[in-house]
Image: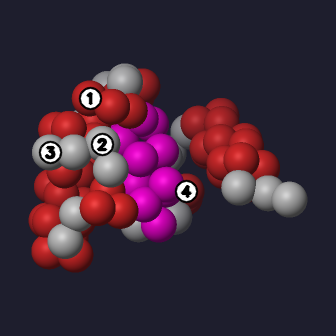
Amino acid sequence: MDLDDLMQRYFGSDDVAALPPGAVAAGTERLRVDFGLERDGARRFGLWALLYMLGDAPDLDVAFKDAATREAARNFMDLAAGIGGD
């Protein structure tokens, strides 16, 4: 999944910080609904990753049944934490 495509699809912009709070909330809600309906593992992970970056991802044990996918999500979380690090 391409992050820019997801941002355009759910928010109509690639700059969420420039959007009014209502637009962010509406886009995030659509994203959560699609995440809940998605059955393809790779697409589901991509949607979860965007939700995580927005601070609205479900807990790993709720989001992913597979232990390997939960571990991949933990690795993603560690990498994302390093991006904004010291």
Q: Does the rendering let one see residue 36?
A: no
In the rendered view, does 24 fall on the left or right side of 17?
left
- Position of residue 15 in the picture relative to residue 62 (left or right): left
Q: Residue at x 49, y 56 (%)?
A: 52
List the residue tagged with mark 2.
14
Q: Is residue 65 above or below residue 69?
A: below
Residue 5 to residue 15: above or below? above
3D distance between C-alphas at marks 3 and 1: 9 Å
Residue tagged 1: 5
Marks 4 & 3, CB-CB < 8 Å contact: no
Closer to the chain start, of discs 1 and 4, is 1
Q: Are marks 2 and 4 in contact (CB under 8 Å)?
A: no
Q: Of discs 1 and 4, which sits in the foreground?
A: 1
CB of mark 3 within 8 Å of CB of mark 1? Answer: no
Question: In percent of the image, x 71 and y 55: which residue is there?
Answer: 84
Amino acid type at circle 2 is Asp
Q: Which residue is mark 3?
A: 12
- Identified by mark 4, the residue type is Leu
Badge 4 marks a residue whose secondary structure is helix
Along the horizontal axis of the image, is 12 left or right of 45? left
Distance between the Cα atoms at labels 2 and 4?
26 Å
Front-lying residue, 61 or 6: 6
First of labels 3, 1 by sequence position: 1
Residue drawn at (29%, 61%) of the image: 18
Please name the residue that numbered disc 4 is placed on. 60
Residue 19: x and y, percent? 22, 63
Circle 1: residue type: Asp
Q: Are marks 1 and 2 in contact (CB under 8 Å)?
A: no
Residue stretch in magenta: 44-55
Q: In the rendered view, does 13 fall on the left or right side of 17?
A: left
Between label 2 and label 4, give the one nearer the viewer.
2
